[in-house]
Amino acid sequence: MRKVSLFCTKCGKAFPVDSSNFRCDICNEPLELELVTKGKIREGNILRQSILERYADFFPFKDLNEDISLHEGFTPLIKSKVVSELLDFKSIYFKNEGENPTWAYKDRGTIVALQHALKLGYNKVGTVSCGNMAVSVAAYGSRAGLKTFIFLKENMPDEKLGPVAIYNPISVKVQGFYGDLYDKSLEIGKKNDIYFLNSDIPFRVEGSKTISFEICEQLDFAVPDYIVMPSGSGGNFRGVEKGFRELKNCGLIDKIPKIICVQAAGCSPVYNAFKNNEETIKRVQEAETIALAIANPFPPSGNQVLRRLKENGGTCVAVADELIVEAQRLLALEGIFVQPSSAAPLAAIKKLKEENYLTGNEKIACILTAGGLKVPSALAKHKFQTYDCELENLDQFIKTNFLN
Amino acid sequence: MRKVSLFCTKCGKAFPVDSSNFRCDICNEPLELELVTKGKIREGNILRQSILERYADFFPFKDLNEDISLHEGFTPLIKSKVVSELLDFKSIYFKNEGENPTWAYKDRGTIVALQHALKLGYNKVGTVSCGNMAVSVAAYGSRAGLKTFIFLKENMPDEKLGPVAIYNPISVKVQGFYGDLYDKSLEIGKKNDIYFLNSDIPFRVEGSKTISFEICEQLDFAVPDYIVMPSGSGGNFRGVEKGFRELKNCGLIDKIPKIICVQAAGCSPVYNAFKNNEETIKRVQEAETIALAIANPFPPSGNQVLRRLKENGGTCVAVADELIVEAQRLLALEGIFVQPSSAAPLAAIKKLKEENYLTGNEKIACILTAGGLKVPSALAKHKFQTYDCELENLDQFIKTNFLN
């Protein structure tokens, strides 16, 4: 690894990068790799490249372990056609992270953090998650031949267990307060040499940077005015925001987009603090939302999101479940089926236009973090019309009812 | 469109390409576009390109409608690490079609056939499917602003309906013999100006060619010895096989891989005919397999698959459901979760090695046609071990049971 340092995002204390320090021993705030200030994107045929290789200048690794890659990232940026017309926007783009190997953006952070874990000599990894991160870590952990621990909620429904368990990790349902499991897992990891790839660890944040790198490439470096993205733990927000800053530092773009951080109204600790201009988040007592993937009552990177948001000049929005479900349907009309949390950004865009925060003339990139098949239960929130017809009457039925 | 012709795959009768003729009026065998003999791959940054643009020389279109693209294709080719070691193979590659916009290879054919439909001035499209094709056509039909008809089986389970209906097509459950619906839909289409994007229509076959183009690019034009792929209707097989022939004609590759066509033992009309050296397939009376996506009792391109398979020198294999389920698990260990039909090729590879048809020294590319979340019910076929533990005992529990 190149000589870089980890710094506490709050007090600035430095930590060596060749350790698995994830949080500051003084503030308990998240650590982060120092900003890259010199680098370029390595050209090449993406069909034969990995994100680690293409964006190598932005990571401190040498001698990548490419074998364990599933070719994560390089997801499409789709120009809106249906939605922008319906909501009267000039230019909305959707970054479709549902086209990743495990159908969520998490794979980017997993592959980058795994490189770090392997460099440090770990042969055991783990995570705390009931959703996309559990799936991603289980998949890559198996591929890499690592003993993989997944700590789950005790009442994890079968709908969500199967897609994790199919990769054969050690799945442990943990009884007790799930909110305490994040810190506990890092503690267990330290003691037992297990690298816990939790939601906002430094190298997972580094993986999320590649979303920004790709958006810039896809827009030919004509940066959008706004990035709209959902935020739970805050790790992905931090990565995306850092990615743009690094590209600007490297002279590849000339401005940084404002970021709109979207939470579900039923669990919005970051929004609550942002709205009240507070510097630290408060734990939400009861989370109730369909957008489970971002329903983190006490986001481990919440304070850092607040700090970066203030600097960035963006805003934070909370959207109700009805709006999220409506946005999920709107996105499907666009041809893109996403999970509820990934529909939250579009719900926010609609809301912010109604509130005249957005005019419709902005260039907006919306990050759709995961595919719709991840949360099939959300389909029950929609009313679907179907018709019944006998084969021999089909021609007439179609003519009479649908062709005038 | 360029001046090319459609030909009957059996009798060779020519049809104009600017019509929606899909089958020969003499043989009722499928039509196909004439072979491309001159062309090259257009270089460029794939992040800003579509398959239609990159492989434009291999399609007869001018003035593409890029707006309706969801950036289908450009899926990863992953070198096997876990499976090849377990099964003692030197080099197996997995083409992961689960990373398409609707998580199946169908999107390639849908976008190409839609270009054709739009050129011909159609504003209504449809398909006959209960699975991946229905989803794909519904998604793209909505995006393109076309009235979209999906003809479904009468007993379509809700698990499969929601992921189609979310895109808001006109969904009709048709009572009667589903096997007759294919021809009936083409008839209804002709009469009512609806372009039916069924499984093996000529331009859908053209879309499947891009799988071969990408595999060749990904292997730096060092072609594999074998392509192993599942086959239901036969449309995808035809496209993949044609793609390699065209690249050879264009001087881009120096040999054509042998193709191993894989069916489920519970529904294997092509295998039955191939094994008995017959020239036409016979309808299977009762289809019973977990691999529903390839359970076509009377494949509309079955005879053409037999013709091409004989010429190609490949073979046809039928695999039992137990082997398919086992292969699904093996692929998950590799980090790739696929639907049952997509695990059938790996089941075949294992079987063919046991039968000494394959030695383990071959270079093999295996086409994984769709992602595992498409068929969540298949997860019930697997036994998953989970553990329960209280939060305060977690550290000790992990130590005692998993760390020695």
Image (cartoon, coloured by chain):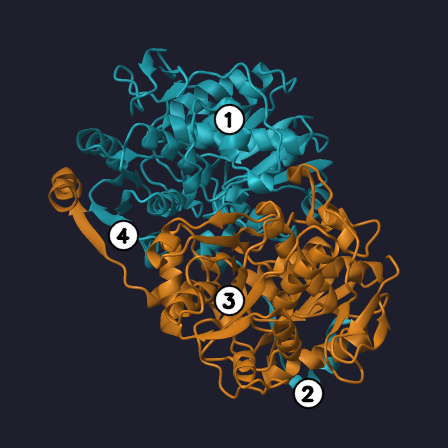
Chain colours: A orange, B cyan
Find the distance from the CA under tag 3 to the CA under tag 4. 26 Å
Q: Position of residue A188 (x, y in %)?
A: 75, 78
One can see residue A20 in this view = no
Find the distance from the CA under tag 3 to the CA under tag 2. 24 Å
**Kind of element beneath mark 3:** helix
Q: Earlier in the sequence, mark 2 or mark 4?
A: 4
Q: Which mark is residue A216?
A: none
Q: Are marks 3 and 4 on the same chain?
A: no
Query: Mark 1 or mark 4, which is nearer to you?
Result: 1
Q: What residue is disc 3 on?
A: A160
- Three-letter amino acid code of the residue under disc 2: Glu
Q: What residue is disc 2 on?
A: B392
Judge from the rendering whether residue A38 lies leftward or rightward of residue A345; answer left or right.
right
Q: Are marks 3 and 1 on the same chain?
A: no
Which image quarter: residue A386? bottom left
Confirm or deny contact between disc 1 and disc 4 (CB under 8 A). Answer: no
Mark 4 neighbour class, 10 Å CA radius: few under 14, some 14 to 19, many 20 or more = few
